[in-house]
Amino acid sequence: MKELIKKIRISLNMSQTELAELLNISFATVNRWENGRAVPNKLAQSTLYELCKTNNVPVYDMVFDKIKAATEAVKIDENRVLLYHGSKSGIQGKIEPKSRSKCDFGKGFYMGTEPSQALTLICDYDKSKFYIVSVAVDKLAILDVPADLEWAMIVAYHRGRMDKIKGTDFYNKYHDMANGKDMIVGSIANDRMFYVIDNFFLGNITDAALVNSLSALELGKQYVAITQKACDFVKIECEVELSYLERQFLKDVAGENREKGTSLANDICKNYRREGMFFDELLDAALKGE
């Protein structure tokens, strides 16, 4: 937190005394913040948030600079992949595949190649924790899912969207797909893509629109440890602390990205409204054995 306060003050082109006067606090308080002898309370961070917003201080970028520096400091073996994980209340004890079963690839321990997705998931939670982790992928049986309609159908299966066609060959294909695998690797439904894929499930856009969205967006990957064996090969490299102030800026950007997703989905609907099949049509075809 001390480095963040200093960066904010420098961005505002202020001395410690000037910042203290603007915040209606003592010089000594600002000095203690920057020396790490004290941390701004929630009220003070809320005031700093408003100040930074008004003056366009790039706190969001500062968060990523901090994560980048922490990432560069981590040294891993060649057989390991460096990833990011966000937890709403922190990791307690042994890492286990115990997320909600209705997540993209089912129950597991989720990690991503891009820090933004993990940060988006946890920015609403006061006790959330952000981790840089690594996993030894060479020791695991992995299902690598391509960024196409197949990916969407796997997500649909795990989110319970295919329940009405249980027992069909189409349903069983996705039910059995990860059988014998320790880890699933596939695209992340980031803030923009999450809106698009939900529109696909709701019948607002076709599979053609969805596939074109996938090709248009640069999606990061998520690595999901679905067995305990895979979780045992995950190592926490370091924890990056996130203050209340930083989480507020993360929430703002997440909201902006969702708005971009809405706009993107609407544009795709217009461009591909007469091409491809809708999700319910695909399921109906599966029921008929087509």
Image: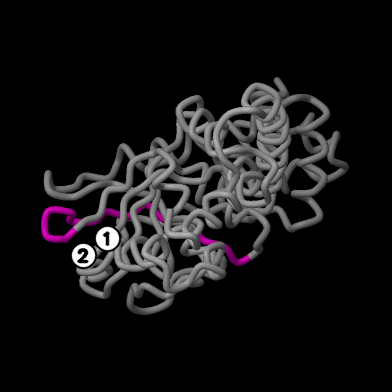
How crowded pointer 1 is (Cα within 10 Å; few <14, some 14-19, many 20+) is rated as many
Compared across the picture, whether 52 is left or right of 8 comes to: right
What residue is drawn where x is 52% and y is 42%?
Answer: 116
Q: Position of residue 163 (x, y in %)?
A: 54, 70
Q: Quadrant of residue 23?
A: top right
What range of the chain is rendered magenta?
A: 127-141
- State which tag comes first along the sequence, 2 or 1: 1
Frontmost of labels 2 and 1 is 1
Quadrant of residue 93 in the image?
Answer: bottom left
Dot 2 falls on a residue whose secondary structure is: loop
- Residue 140 colored magenta? yes
Residue toward you, 163 or 119: 163
Alpha carbons under labels 2 and 1: distance apart? 11 Å
Whether residue 223 appears in magenta in the rendering, the answer is no
Q: Is residue 174 left or right of residue 197?
A: left
Residue 76 % position (x, y): 19, 47
Q: Give the residue at the far bottom of this rendering.
A: 93
Q: Mark 2: which amino acid?
A: Phe
Q: Along the horizontal axis of the image, is 104 left or right of 233?
A: right
Residue visible at 21% across and 44% down? 75
**Which residue is the site of mark 1?**
183
Q: Residue at x 79, y 48 (%)?
A: 46
**Label 2: which residue?**
233
Closest to the observer: 70 or 141?
A: 141
Residue 32 in the image: above or below residue 287: above
